[in-house]
Image: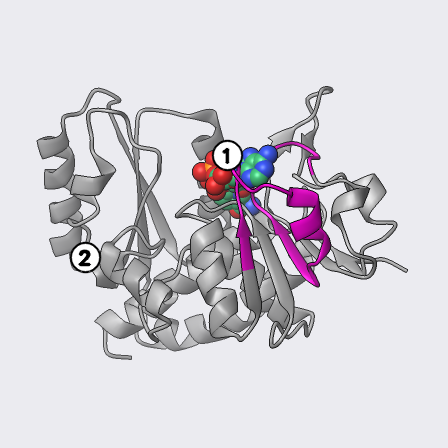
Amino acid sequence: MEKILKGKEVADALKQRLKQEMEEFHKKNITPNLTIVIVGDRPDSAAYIKGAVKRCSEIGIECNVRELPKDLGQDKFVDVIQKLNDDEKVNGIMIMRPLPPQISENVVKYEIYPAKDVDCFSPVNLSKVMSGEEGGFAPCTPSAVMEILHHYGIDPRGKKAVIIGRSMVVGRPLAMMLLKENATITVCHTKTLNLAEEAGRAEILIAAAGKAKMVKRNMVKEGAVVIDVGINFDENGRMCGDVDFDEISQVAGMITPVPGGVGAVTSTILAKHVIDACKIQKNL
Ligand code: NAD
């Protein structure tokens, strides 16, 4: 019997905990602030920002969006980040990626203060995730996957976890976060020789490839926990994940849907990181 792991349920539980934490802030007249920086406009970023703004306002976090022209030069972009770093009213900074080609991520990622870097752009935060060091901010999407596992009592310890995708925003950091919780990890990618065989060994299978419905029946072990990070659109223009949900929900022990799975949790994790950043900056 399949069990649907509902992102909304996870996000609502986390939201309740964050609202309680916010009561302490209200007593001290503190409103945490998140500033989202976007260069140019991209429809996928616009949807993400809309969700983040809504979630922040539900929790009581102020959220500003700085929209910068798409042809902004790298030096001017760095000026904006440095001003936000120095602005005491700003607790969290999120830079929407990818940045346009004239701005090098490998240059500007060193500019954001790690203490305000709520989505793990800074190499300081990334290295903490990679080395398993406490503190810092992990990227929101892999953190949302971990939150779902924790919420539903799925302990990665000793389990075979297979991740499809090795990007710096999802696959790689997630591998390290699962490793920290004592899973045995395999990371698959476009050059993996026998993907079905590798994926088929997973007790926890995480799909983060960005390929609509690529995970088919022959890739999933009976009873596996299947977490679908992908956000794609099928031939009818409907949002779907990397997992063929209709097929896989017949065999998986537990499975996240798309929409309504990982994506539903990500913006609440972002809100949590802003609150954590504010606490550290204000010594609360
Ligand atoms: P990416 O394109 O940067 O990386 C995709 C990875 O998947 C690569 O490492 C590639 O090697 C691997 N891959 C691609 N096709 C493959 C195949 N056929 N077989 C094996 N490996 C393959 O993408 P990303 O930024 O990591 O995002 C992955 C997916 O997650 C996308 O659909 C994206 O929209 C989604 N996403 C969701 C959230 C969320 O909040 N739910 C957040 C970020 C990204």
Query: What label does residue 233 carry, if any?
Result: none
- Residue designated by label 1: 47
- Which residue is at 39% across, 62% downward? 273
Label 1: which secondary element = helix
**Magenta stretch bounds:** 186-214
Between circles 1 and 2, the one closer to the viewer is 2
Which of 191/207 is in front?
191
Sooner in the amino-acid sequence: mark 1 or mark 2 = 1
Say what amino acid the circle numbered 2 marks. Answer: Tyr
- Which residue is at 65% across, 71% downward? 159
Label 2: which secondary element = loop
Find residue 241 and report its horizontal and vertical position in percent: 66, 39
Against 114, is 250 above or below?
above
Q: Is mark 1 within 8 Å of ligand 1?
A: no
- Residue designated by label 2: 113
Q: Residues within 10 Å of mark 1 (few under 14, many from 20)?
A: few
Q: Is residue 217 left or right of residue 169?
A: right
> Residue 206 lies in magenta, yes or no?
yes
Say what amino acid the circle numbered 1 marks. Answer: Ala
- Which residue is at 10% across, 39% downward? 79
